[in-house]
Image (cartoon, rainbow, N blue to C red):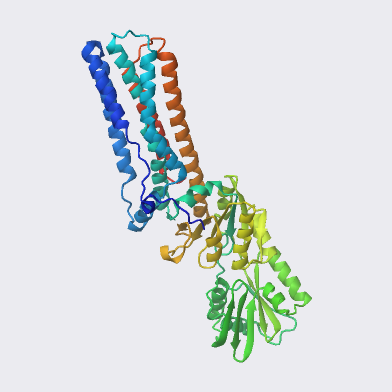
Amino acid sequence: MNTETENSTSKGKAIPKAFGQLGVSALALVSLLVAAILNPDLWIQFGLASGLVLLTFLFVSRVEKASKKPWESLEAQLLIEAAEKQISRKEKFIGLLAMYWPVFVLVMAIVAVVLSPYSADNLSEKLTVFAAVLLLTNVQSLALTIPVAISNALRAGAGAGLLIRNRKAFEAAAKLDLVLFTKGGLLTEHPKGVSAVHLSVNSSLGDESKLLALAASAEYMSEHVFAKAIRKSAGTANLKIAKAKDFKEYSGLGVEANVAGQQVLVGSIALLIQRNIRMEVQELIYADESTKNGYSIVCVVVDGVLEGLLRFSDVLKPNSALAVYMVAKERIRVGIATGDSAGTAQQKAEQVAVSEVYAELSPARKALFVESEQAKGARVGVIADSQTDSALLEQADMSIALGEDLELDSTEADVLVRSDDPALAAQVIALSARLRRRTNLGLGFGLSYGVLSLASFVAIVSPLQVVASPAIAALLGSLSLLFVTLNAYSLGKLK
């Protein structure tokens, strides 16, 4: 998880704000007032320009107030405020640019006056040119772009249950190279019970219910989803569950316990291979056919002998394919990282159109895989369950944790999604991409308009003695601010 942030409060330095626009506007109006006193024909221009300047500042004040409007949830409000204080490099640069922009405008206004063909004694005309240049741009169109956009994005996310804790990681989500989804409980539903019980050819139990009861007893202390499903099926069948001793859990592989004097091992085929436990051809065929059809398999071993297999249904969630599409359409590679067998993982990957499948990985190996991708220069995002894949979330450059009952202190993920809908988690990536596009559009327009309009005025309007209307200049400056701000406000809702 990416934890580096540039927090203005922690460093004791606030980002430079767009001071100077008030001074620029005041200087322009004073100049225009003097010009109107010298030339009464300019009083209408002065009145119109003054009204536009006043309306612009009222609009800016309302925008800033709306951006700081308290959120309904105190928890979400605190997160929003914390994220807003995490200043990105781009915002810091734009803040510096906004701080010095009024000086640039003032210089351009002086140049325009010098280049204008009006005689030295025609002071009213020169003051009119000077005022027009000062009113032609509005620095707040730059200064407000990122703050308004990020505030609206954070609030839009909070309204949908997306709690963004790390702003830097959230903004960088649109630039990820690879996003990994975990499978069980995220792209697929958690199993509600055991779908089928299969006794091995060498089983001495002779009864499927005995196999299920032994598995439930061994899994009694485990919180894994398969363990819960096994206990639920045993409870539904009214099977007697014995008290296990010497319980051991092997992360991502299975459990082991002593049940009524028998050593019971319940886990994956990978665990059997690790323990060098024999599987007969019939069981291998059964397991292979099951995984190819999308089922998950758990083996039950008693005193070193494979007694049978438990099969679990693995059903995709309704929005899983949509979630994958939402990430892929941002031109980001999508993969699945899971502890399930390659056959089960591949079958589900084909259903959601994922080409990169990384199967039979323990939680630790998932984190190592992400680390290996990062070593190659890839920026990796992870969408996972915080309870089972905390190491994976911690290693990722951008991490999204899912869960209906998630609490802030339960995970260090960058974004918390209080839902089990993977499409909502994918909205985080989509929202980050929209934020990036909107801020780039706003800043690009604001900068290009400012430079081109001033350059055009100085190079063309002033030297050619075209009538310079301060009112029209003020209107153009206000419209540029309106366009940039409304563009940023378009992030106010998730789509």
Q: Residue at x 39, y 27 (%)?
A: 104
Instruction: Answer with left or right where residue 431 lies relative to residue 114.
Output: right
> Could you tell whether 194 is left or right of 201 in the image?
left
Between residues 132 and 359, which one lies in front from this camera angle? Answer: 132
Residue at 26% from the left image edge and 27% from the top image edge: 26
Image coordinates of residue 31 in percent, x first then y, are 27, 20
Figure check: 268 above or below 366: below
Residue 412 image point, x, y percent: 47, 62
Is residue 297 something that shows in the picture? yes
Find residue 360 and report its horizontal and vertical position in percent. Answer: 66, 66
Q: Residue furthest bottom?
A: 261
In the displayed structure, does residue 180 sit left or right of residue 35?
A: right
Number of marks present in the image shown: 0
Quadrant of residue 161 within the rendered picture: bottom left
In the displayed structure, would residue 372 be above or below residue 138? below
Where is residue 345? Give x, y as percent: 66, 62
Is residue 338 something that shows in the picture?
no
Picture residue at 59% right of the left edge, 56% below the top: 180
Q: Residue furthest right?
A: 281
Residue 129 versus residue 229 in the image, above or below: above
Classify residue 488 by image quadrant: top left
Which quadrant holds residue 217?
A: bottom right
Asked whether, in this view, residue 376 is left or right of residue 382, the answer is right
Residue closest to the eye, 455 or 436: 455
